[in-house]
Image (cartoon, helix red, strand yellow):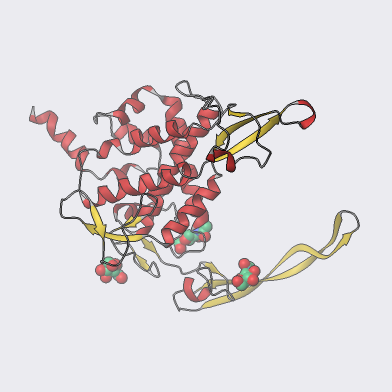
Amino acid sequence: MHAVLVPVYLLLITPITSSWWAAGSQVVMDPHSICKKSRKIKGKMSEICRTDSPLLDEISKGVKQGHDECQYQFRYRRWNCTASKRSMKKVLLRDTRETGFVNALTAAGVAYAITRACTMNVLTDCSCNKNVKRMKKGDKRTSNAMNLPESKWQWTGCGDNINYGIKVSKDFMDSRYKKMSDMKTIVKLHNYAAGRMAIKKHMRSDCKCHGLSGSCALRTCWRKMPTFREVGNRLKEHFDGAAKVIAGNDGNSFIPDGDTIKPPNREDLVYSEESPKFCTPNSTVGSLGTQGRECNATSQGEEGCDILCCGRGHTTIKKKAYGNCNCEFIWCCEVKCQTCLLENEISTCL
Ligand SMILES: *[C@@H]1O[C@H](CO)[C@@H](O)[C@H](O)[C@H]1NC(C)=O
Ligand SMILES: *[C@@H]1O[C@H](CO)[C@@H](O)[C@H](O)[C@H]1NC(C)=O
Ligand SMILES: *[C@@H]1O[C@H](CO)[C@@H](O)[C@H](O)[C@H]1NC(C)=O
């Protein structure tokens, strides 16, 4: 009996983040490899692993989309959501604002990819949301919809099935943490949920008119997800305003760190550890440093050399490249340019 229990126990206490990377020095975040490692774990996640390869493929796409968006949002930050294993691994094992951001975007990416797959009919267990609901006159939901005189309209067509996407994201990502109530796990599950909310709370309506010569006697409307870029932008705002939390007294919740801050709501990101500065290489915290990073010499923002280079200064080289010049607007509607050899200044951190 013990011979069986020990390996299972070891799997459960091995931080699951260890399966989000694999090949060489790059983070892969491949759900298929998570499944291989997690064969002995029961629950909804293993059901997906065992039986549903198409679903796993979509989950992979979602994880990748989340990571790509993370790199886009953090392209000018000292820590740029690098796929380098020695960095990402350490960041995921901690509980900083960066950890929360990556987790939220990953959970959102999975929910998004599954929902999109349902709409496009590539999965057997779901389709688009065909719920037809007749709208009452003056229904609040009509106000988002097309600005047209009130006429009969209905929910129909092919709406995005966000509830199914969220269910799969939860089954795959949350279910393995069900019996854990340590601080990091509670924070992680909160941030997963916040990532999904960044989609679900911001669904919009799209409508189409039907009827003779645009009379719009009947309108059909359906629910649509925001673009994933919008989801990323929103989560970046939540990252900037993330709330630091400490463990609550009951042992399975958290409370704001400091008594003046309002409690974080379901869409807010939370963290329990301060971030490192990420200025210099430090393998303990997964910092690669910013030496050699491209920066903007005139900007005061996070992409500016002052902040990105941590006060170490920067060098600027002139680089020549062909580009458009002497552009002329020709009535109507064309822009004509010449090609010239242009000199660009490129600054990099010392
Ligand atoms: C790396 O970071 C840790 C944690 O912040 C710190 O204790 C340690 O001194 C750092 N090491 C170096 C070489 O800077
Ligand atoms: C991200 O940061 C690392 C380390 O600072 C750097 O090597 C890499 O080129 C950066 N990636 C991008 C896309 O800027
Ligand atoms: C650098 O920052 C300045 C000020 O924010 C901006 O006008 C300029 O376009 C930026 N340059 C590049 C190459 O991004």
Which residue is pictured at 33% across the width and 41% down the height?
19
The one nearer the camera, 230 or 285, is: 230
Relative side of 222 to 237, left or right? right
Which residue is pictured at 53% across the width and 45% down the height?
228
Q: Is residue 46 placed above or below 268 in the rendered structure? A: above
Which residue is pictured at 51% across the width and 66% down the height?
293
Q: Is residue 202 placed above or below 151 in the rendered structure? A: below
Relative side of 181 to 296, left or right? left
Q: Is residue 258 placed above or below 238 in the rendered structure? A: below
In this figure, what is the number of numbered marks? 0
Relative side of 210 to 9, left or right? right
> Percent x, y for residue 113?
49, 36
> Percent x, y for residue 108?
44, 43
> Percent x, y for residue 276?
34, 66
> Percent x, y for residue 140?
53, 40
User: In the rendered view of the protein, which quadrant contains the N terminus?
Assistant: top left
Work out whether residue 346 can be spotted: no
Which residue is pictured at 77% across the width and 32% down the height?
214
The one nearer the camera, 210 or 20, is: 210
Work out whether residue 294 can be spotted: yes
